């Protein structure tokens, strides 16, 4: 059963810490992070999420940013959660950080406060079938999510609100955004990554969306094992460490596959509906003008 609580005065912190078999540094989601109180907490603390080997127990540490050691210790434990319906790290992180916020703000966190926090969390993870038209059938049930990042022109910077502004849920909405061209000296990059699974797709091909490229499929680096697809804006010319702010961008598509030939086959299957979505978005933009 899903349950959670803040770490209270009489809790055995050493025993709780021993229940965690692994941990990683975490941040709240973009939407939660826009809360001024959460943003202030992120300035004051580094958050670490830990979990048991069976993923039934989860715990959060809040380590002060000025801590001399900088590693989670029992005194940094702030909240725990058990038996989430899905191993959704973002939902679990948001829930525990929100409980930490309530624990700092309120004299006593009640069962109703905890229940309200748990009910606000969405533990579901979308699948490739709902996100990427044209994807091979073996990808359809894979839990996954599009993540956005940026390449910058000189003199430009990124900030939390920028990630939220360009967050898109699926490939069709991404194509509508890419059809608008460049935005304020940035290049948009959207990557589809699996969650909780590592697909056996070791090759990928990277070509301009509107035409076949010349470079052959390449083996993926180990850290990119969970990447199925990437849609991004590309400018060939470079100035210093950035890209020219006014140069037009080419939309490129990177797609994974089991073999080199399979990657090419997947690229064509995915490119077709994305080209159609791109043409439709551009037609609608011209009609509005």
Image: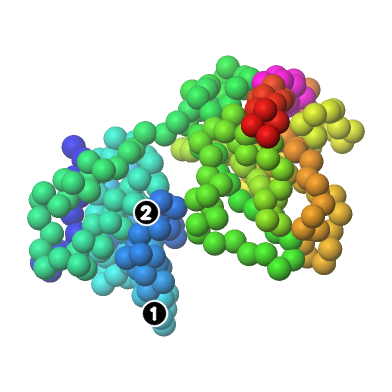
Quarter residue 65 falls in: bottom left
Circle 2 crowding by C-alpha within 10 Å: few under 14, some 14–19, many from 20: some
Residue drawn at the location 71% of the way across and 68% of the way down: 155
Circle 1 crowding by C-alpha within 10 Å: few under 14, some 14–19, many from 20: few
The residue labelled by disc 2 is 32
In this view, which residue lies farthest toward the top?
A: 137
Which of marks 1 and 2 precedes in the sequence? 2
Indicate left or right for 171 with 203 as reference.
Answer: left
In this view, which residue lies farthest toward the front?
A: 289
- The question of residue 102 being in magenta is answered with no
The x and y percentages for residue 25 are 44, 60
In the rendered view of the protein, which quadrant contains the N terminus?
top left
The residue labelled by disc 1 is 67
Residue drawn at the location 52% of the way across and 49% of the way down: 165
Quarter residue 281 falls in: top right
The answer to whether residue 80 is above or below residue 241 is above
Question: Residues in magenta?
Answer: 262-274
The x and y percentages for residue 119 are 22, 41
Q: Main secondary structure of the magenta part?
A: helix
Viewer-proximal residue among 20 and 59: 59
């Amino acid at each position: 059963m899903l349950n959670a609580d803040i770490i209270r005065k009489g809790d055995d912190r050493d025993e709780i810490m021993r229940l965690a078999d692994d941990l990683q540094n975490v941040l709240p989601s973009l939407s939660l992070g826009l809360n001024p109180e959460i943003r202030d907490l992120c300035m004051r603390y580094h958050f670490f999420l830990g979990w048991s080997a069976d993923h039934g127990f989860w715990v959060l540490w809040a380590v002060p940013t000025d801590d001399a050691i900088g590693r989670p210790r029992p005194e940094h434990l702030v909240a725990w959660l058990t038996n989430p319906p899905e191993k959704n790290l973002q939902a679990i992180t948001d829930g525990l950080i929100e409980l930490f916020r309530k624990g700092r703000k309120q004299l006593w966190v009640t069962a109703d406060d905890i229940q309200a926090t748990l009910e606000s969390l969405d533990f579901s993870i979308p699948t490739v079938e709902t996100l990427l038209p044209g994807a091979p059938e073996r990808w359809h049930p894979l839990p996954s999510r599009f993540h956005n990042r940026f390449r910058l022109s000189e003199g430009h910077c990124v900030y939390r609100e920028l990630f939220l502004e360009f967050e898109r849920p699926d490939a069709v909405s991404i194509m509508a955004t890419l059809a608008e061209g460049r935005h304020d000296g940035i290049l948009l990059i959207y990557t589809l990554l699996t969650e909780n699974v590592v697909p056996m797709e070791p090759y990928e091909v990277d070509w301009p969306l509107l035409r076949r490229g010349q470079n052959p499929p390449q083996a993926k680096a180990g850290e990119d094992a969970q990447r199925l697809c990437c849609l991004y804006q590309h400018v060939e010319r470079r100035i210093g460490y950035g890209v020219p702010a006014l140069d037009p961008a080419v939309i490129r598509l990177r797609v994974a596959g089991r073999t080199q030939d399979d990657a090419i086959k997947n690229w064509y299957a995915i490119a077709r509906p994305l080209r159609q979505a791109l043409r439709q978005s551009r037609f609608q933009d011209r009609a509005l003008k």
